[in-house]
Image: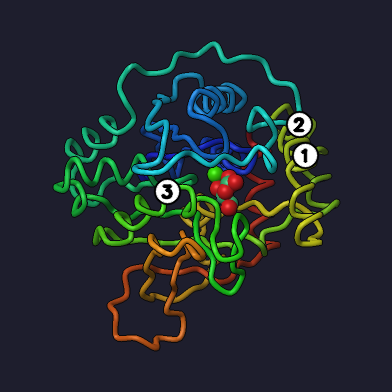
Amino acid sequence: ARKIIIDTDPGQDDAVAILLALASPQELEVLGITAVAGNVPLALTAKNARIICELAGKPDVKVFAGCDAPLTRKLVTAEHVHGKTGLDGPQLPAPQMPLQEQHAVDFIIDTLRAEDAGAVTLCALGPLTNIATALQRAPDIAPKIAEIVLMGGAYFEVGNITPTAEFNIYVDPEAAAVVFKSGAPLTVMPLDVTHKALTNAARVQSFRDMGTEPGRMVAEWTDFFERFDKEKYGSEGAPLHDPCVIAWLLQPGLFSGRKINVEIETESALTLGMTVADWWGVTDRAANALFIGDVDADGFFALLTERIGRL
Ligand code: BDR
Ligand code: CA
């Protein structure tokens, strides 16, 4: 199985991504889950990560708390999308499993140093603060990373937190710039693809029909989470942004994209956090990311329901 660390700020869509990974032990070994501040403050994301592990019946997964604020900026949160707890929708019990004592950044550094080069993949589902801090503190880990697969950015779909920026990149653009300049292989799931991974009534019903606790929770989370996108974008359902990252590891054939140059805007007040993606190759800047543009949505939901149904 491929060894992964999931860096996350749950978030209903993060929760579905974590369930998908934990339901796929043949392909993915989750070495740890590192929480970061993002959708809601760190204390809540670290708590939510543990709620999700327990829901999946995996209380032995190691969960670490990381950075509570972006590298240089004040934290911007997204309760307007995810609710006050970050996991609004169903009522879930407080977690019993412990939070690890080690800081998430130290866990990321130590794990990459201990494992062979190319053995560990980082899955980033929130602002990139933990990963950038690890890269800044321990530059020797960059060449050891197999791949960083991240949900973030947007190009043709422009922004969801400002007119030109996607939330994860906007919250910590300096961290995103560190990651995009790190030289580590990058696969990026921008809004261009995640806005195609939309729930609809039939897809949500298939989660409900599982008759399991995880199935019911996924249905209730997406019921809550779809309100924002229905109002703002007039879309049919909820975009399952973060599960695209895990689905890429399980079934890359569902996705297509281009290897291009992507730079992060960190200075302009107007376009802060924009992913400036050279989709048409109009510069000679070297490609640094596989930027995904399309997904087979039916195949994606077939994978998701088959796996969540195993829990
Ligand atoms: C991203 O921001 C968060 O609200 C979601 O969890 C996802 O990671 C989408 O822009
Ligand atoms: Ca997220």
Could you tell me how far apart the alpha carbons at marks 2 and 3 are, in whole angstroms? 27 Å
Label 3 amino acid? Asp
Q: Which residue is identified by label 2?
A: 89
Q: What residue is drawn where x is 73% and y is 43%?
A: 225
Is residue 91 visible in the rendered structure shown here?
Answer: yes
Query: Looking at the picture, how far across and down is residue 199, in whole percent?
Result: 75, 53
Residues at discs 1 and 3 in contact (Cβ within 8 Å): no
The quadrant the N terminus occupies is top left
Position of 116 compared to 286: left or right? Answer: left
Judge whether residue 193 can be spotted in this image: no
Distance from the alpha carbon under mark 1 to that under mark 3: 26 Å
- Who is closer to the viewer here, 25 or 87? 87
x and y, in percent, of residue 108 in the image: 29, 36
Looking at the image, residue 103 lies above or below residue 208:
above
Which residue bears the numbered disc 3?
172
Q: Quadrant of residue 111?
A: top left
